[in-house]
């Protein structure tokens, strides 16, 4: 067996044990994970993918990305403990691949490899990849949005700005408006080309991803949604 094959096998084993091994050894924990799991399973049961319901009542504390992930996993036949967690673990795995590739394009292979290893083995990152919560999906989408924006700043290619807008929309679907505030450093970096941020590509991509749920949820629930969520 060649060295390359052994390295790939070792990397695969490390990924499995860090992110997928023992996902259901402990049931859903804390106050948030059981809520999110219940809401996602309720969406799968009722077919209402717009208004989150907790114990039969509308629940507008968070937007629906994690609920959708859990609901789809429930429809796929995953158990009540695995359905909230496996989608987050898979999302994390995909994120780390994209994280490495974007960093390699921007800073080179060595920096990308060490950065990915440091992040991917950090205790809290590993811990949150085992939870069906909003934190890791928001962090992953937001980080990719900022890296896409950095690629736009370096290359001037508008497709990266559109990608940044779409990824920021995913982050906003994961945990509300917090990512918009956190994106200020990217706006400051590109302040001399600020009109580009307001162009049809990034704004359209952002609104196309994040906007429909907010609009439809407001139409269905009116002021109750606005008052609680915002």
Image: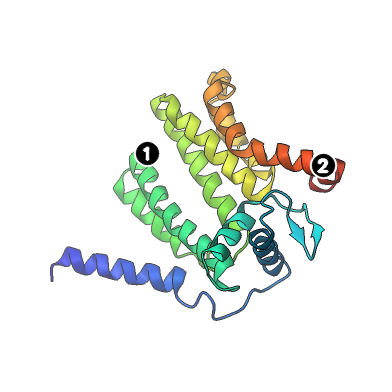
Left or right of 110 on screen, residue 223: right
Q: Is residue 159 above or below residue 79?
A: above
Left or right of 156 on screen, residue 197: right
Q: Name the colour scheme.
A: rainbow
Q: Which quadrant is the C terminus positioned in?
A: top right
Residue 42 is at least partly visible in this image: yes
Percent x, y of residue 96: 42, 54
Q: Is residue 159 above or below residue 140?
A: above
Residue at image mark 1: 106
Judging from the image, what secondary structure is the residue with disc 1 in? helix
Q: Which quadrant is the N terminus positioned in?
A: bottom left
Q: CA distance from mark 1 to mark 2?
A: 40 Å
* Of 183 and 91, the residue lying toward us: 91
* Of 48 and 143, the residue lying toward us: 48
Few, some or many residues within 10 Å of mark 2 (<14, 14–19, 20+): few
Please give the name of the residue rendered at 64% of the width and 74% of the height, measured from the top-left corner: 28
The label nearer to you, 1 versus 2, is: 2
Judging from the image, what secondary structure is the residue with disc 2 in? helix
Q: Is residue 120 above or below residue 213?
A: below
* Of 111 and 67, the residue lying toward us: 67
Residue at image mark 2: 226
Please give the name of the residue rendered at 52% of the width and 51% of the height, measured from the top-left corner: 140
Percent x, y of residue 148: 46, 37
């Amino acid at each position: 067996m060649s060295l390359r094959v052994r390295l790939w096998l070792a990397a695969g084993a490390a990924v499995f044990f860090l992110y997928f091994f023992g996902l259901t050894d402990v049931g859903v924990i804390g106050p948030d994970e059981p809520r999110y799991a219940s809401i996602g399973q309720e969406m799968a049961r009722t077919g209402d993918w717009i208004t989150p319901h907790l114990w039969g009542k509308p629940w507008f504390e968070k937007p629906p990305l994690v609920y959708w992930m859990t609901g789809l996993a429930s429809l796929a036949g995953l158990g009540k403990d695995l359905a909230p967690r496996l989608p987050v673990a898979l999302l994390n795995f995909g994120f780390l691949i994209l994280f490495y590739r974007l960093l390699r394009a921007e800073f080179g292979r060595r920096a990308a490899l060490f950065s990915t290893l440091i992040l991917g083995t950090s205790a809290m990152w590993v811990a949150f990849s085992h939870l069906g919560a909003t934190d890791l999906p928001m962090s992953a989408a937001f980080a990719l949005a900022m890296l896409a924006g950095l690629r736009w700043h370096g290359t001037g290619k508008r497709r990266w700005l559109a990608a940044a807008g779409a990824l920021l929309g995913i982050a906003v679907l994961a945990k509300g408006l917090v990512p918009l505030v956190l994106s200020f450093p990217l706006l400051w970096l590109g302040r001399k080309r600020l009109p580009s941020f307001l162009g049809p590509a990034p704004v359209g991509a952002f609104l196309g991803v994040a906007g429909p749920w907010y609009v439809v949820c407001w139409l269905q629930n009116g002021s109750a949604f606005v008052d609680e969520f915002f």
